[in-house]
Image (cartoon, grey):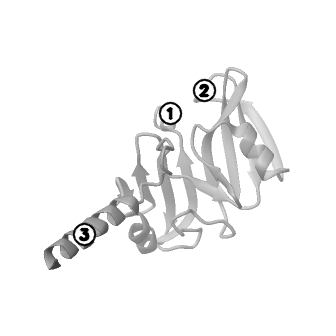
Amino acid sequence: MKKILICLLLAAMVISLVACKDNNTQSGEEDKGYTFTSGTTKIAIDDDVAPILAALGEWRDYDDRPSCGFPGLEKFYIYGGFEINTYPQGEKDFVYMIRLYDDTVVTEEGIRIGSTKEAVIEAYGTPDKQDETLLQYDTNKMFLQFLLTDGIVTTIYYWHPKAAES
């Protein structure tokens, strides 16, 4: 009886560990790399921007200009604490870059402008690229960059992989 109970407990532990694995996706959801959430609106690189803009409401500022990375206009939607840049594809615009520029917003992993280099590494692990002014985390879908001054985060970028080609 003890052996059966031990086996059942071990099986329950294995199932709970597998179920709790955090890979930044929901069950059945495509892996989009790191995401940023404003309020209840989750934003990822390559997302269709129309539903995101509708959910976020009125932006504080807007600009557009010919893109150097994509054909057509790159659009900039500026909200309090962050900015979304888009690229056109067909009749739709998609998220190209998300920039966090003040401490009123925070990444899903708890990092904000003003966080230390050590806090970023604790939250995200060893960066794929780093120097005195940059920590970069790469996925097959996007890049997440933390710009640093004297070991303090000054800007956070979620980038489309095409950024490396531009």
Q: Check if mark 1's residue and mark 2's residue have beta carbons within 8 Å.
A: yes
Q: Earlier in the sequence, mark 1 or mark 2?
A: 2
Q: Is residue 92 visible to the viewer in this orientation of the structure?
A: yes
Taking the image as shown, residue 139 lies to the left or right of residue 108, namely left
Q: Is residue 131 visible to the viewer in this orientation of the structure?
A: no
Q: Nearer the viewer, residue 44 or 117?
A: 44
Taking the image as shown, residue 55 lies to the left or right of residue 13, namely right
| Three-letter code, disc 3 | Leu
Q: Which label number is shown at residue 162?
A: 1
Compared with 93, 59 (above or below) is below
In the current view of this chain or complex, which residue is farthest to the left? 3
Q: Nearer the viewer, residue 142 or 19?
A: 19
| Three-letter code, disc 2 | Phe
Tell me which residue sits at (58%, 29%) in the image: 69
Compared with 155, 150 (above or below) is below
Residue 151's spot in the image, x, y percent?
46, 71
Q: Which residue is mark 2?
A: 70
Tell me which residue sits at (48%, 37%) in the image: 161
Residue 113's spot in the image, x, y percent?
59, 68
As helix, strand or loop, the secondary structure at mark 1 comes to: helix
Q: Nearer the viewer, residue 87 or 28?
A: 28
Q: Which label number is shown at residue 8?
A: 3
**Nearer the observer, disc 2 or disc 3?**
3
Rendered image quadrant of residue 140: top left
